[in-house]
Amino acid sequence: MELALRYVELGLRLGRHVDGVVDSYFGPAEIAERVDAEDVRPPDALADDASALRRELQEADELGPRRRAWLGDQLLGIETFARRLTGEPLAYADEVERCFGLRPRRTPEDVFAAAHERLDAALPGEGDLVARYADWRASQIVPPEAMLDVFSTLRTCFRAATAAALGLPRDEDVETELVRDEPWLAYNYYLGGRRSRIAINVDLPIAAPELVDLVAHEAYPGHHTEHAWKEQLLVDAGVVEESLVLIPTPQSMVSEGIAEIAWEVVDGGGGRRLPRAVAGAAA
C-alpha cells in the first residue's frame, strides 16, 4: 500500500507542473492537500523519483504481480514526461511508446484512399468530395439551444443500453453543461462518488452523428462508466492508485480505447442508426 500511495503523490506532484496532466483525482483528500502544501518538486527530481520507485516495485512483496506491472508502466510514463519537461531530447515515437505503451505506426495512404471511395459512394450529389461532405455535415448540425435536450435523450437511451449490456454501479450519475472558449469539443470531468460532469463546447458546430459518438464516448458506456465502475470495484476496495487518472500514461491510452469503441456496445451492430427519438429531438 505504501508504494501505491507514493505513486499517487508522485503523479500529483507532476500535475503541479502542467495543468491537465492529472485528468482527475478522487482519492483521499489529505494526500492532495499534503502535496499542494509542498514546494514544487523540479521535473528532474520527479523523473529520478519515478525511476527509483520502479526499481523498488520489482522487489516489492506487498503488491501482486499485476499491480506491480501496472504501476511500473505508469511510472515509466511519469518519468518520460518529467524528463521531457527538463528539455531532455527524445524521438517522438520513443516518447509515445514510453508514455503510452504502444509505438505509433504510419497508416498507409491506400487506407485513406479506400475510405474516400466509400464516402464518395455514400454521399449524395456529384463533384468535389470535400464540398459535398461539408454540405452534408452542415445539414446535420445540432443547434446550441437544442444541445442539452438532444444530449439528455441520447443519455437516457445509452444509459439503458449500457445497464442492459454491462450493468451500472450504484448511485452513478452524469450532469451536463454547455461551455465556450475551450480547445476541445467535449470533456468528461470525473468528480468521484460515481459522478461525472460533461462539458460540451458550443463554440464548435456538432453534427447529430458526432453527438451520438460524443455521448457514448464521454458518458455511457465510455469514460463515465469506466471510471464509475473502477471506483466501485477497485478504489473502494483499497486500490488507491486507480483514484488518480494521469494523461501521459498507458492508463489514458486504455481509457481512450474504451471510449472510442463505446458506441459499438450500445449500437448492437445496428450500423450507426440514429434512434428515432433522437432524430426528433435534433430536428
Image (cartoon, helix red, strand yellow):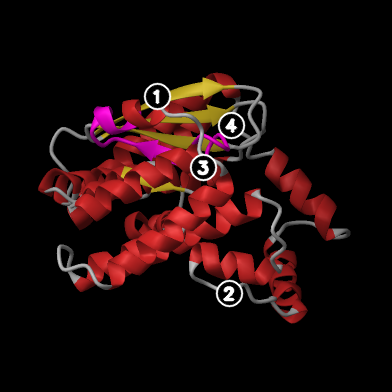
Q: Where does the image place residue 73, in percent across and percent down from the top left?
A: 40, 66
Q: Judge left or right: residue 192 versus residue 188.
A: left
What number of labels is visible? Answer: 4
Comparing marks 3 and 1, which lies closer to the viewer? 1
Gap between marks 4 and 3 measured at Cα: 31 Å
Q: Judge left or right: residue 133 versus residue 253.
A: right
Gap between marks 3 and 2 measured at Cα: 21 Å
Q: Are marks 1 and 2 in contact (CB under 8 Å)?
A: no
Task: Name which of mark 4 and mark 3 comes first in the sequence.
Answer: 3
Q: Is residue 260 visible?
A: no
Q: Judge left or right: residue 254 versus residue 203.
A: left
Amino acid identity at mark 1: Ala
Gap between marks 1 and 2 measured at Cα: 37 Å
Comparing marks 2 and 4, which lies closer to the viewer? 2
Comparing marks 4 and 1, which lies closer to the viewer? 1
Task: Name which of mark 2 and mark 4 comes first in the sequence.
Answer: 2
Q: Which residue is mark 4?
A: 142
Q: Which residue is mark 1?
A: 37
Q: Residues within 10 Å of mark 3 (few under 14, many from 20)?
A: some
Q: Which residue is mark 3?
A: 21
Question: Over which residues does the magenta segment extend?
Answer: 16-32
Which residue is drawn at the image coordinates 61% and 37% (left, top)?
184
Q: Are marks 2 and 4 in contact (CB under 8 Å)?
A: no
Where, by quadrant of the figure, is residue 122 drawn?
Answer: bottom right
Q: Is residue 49 magenta?
A: no
Q: Which residue is mark 2?
A: 103
Q: Nearer the viewer, residue 280 or 129?
A: 129
Amino acid identity at mark 3: Val
Q: Residues within 10 Å of mark 2 (few under 14, many from 20)?
A: few
Gap between marks 3 and 1 measured at Cα: 19 Å
Task: Name which of mark 1 and mark 2 comes first in the sequence.
Answer: 1
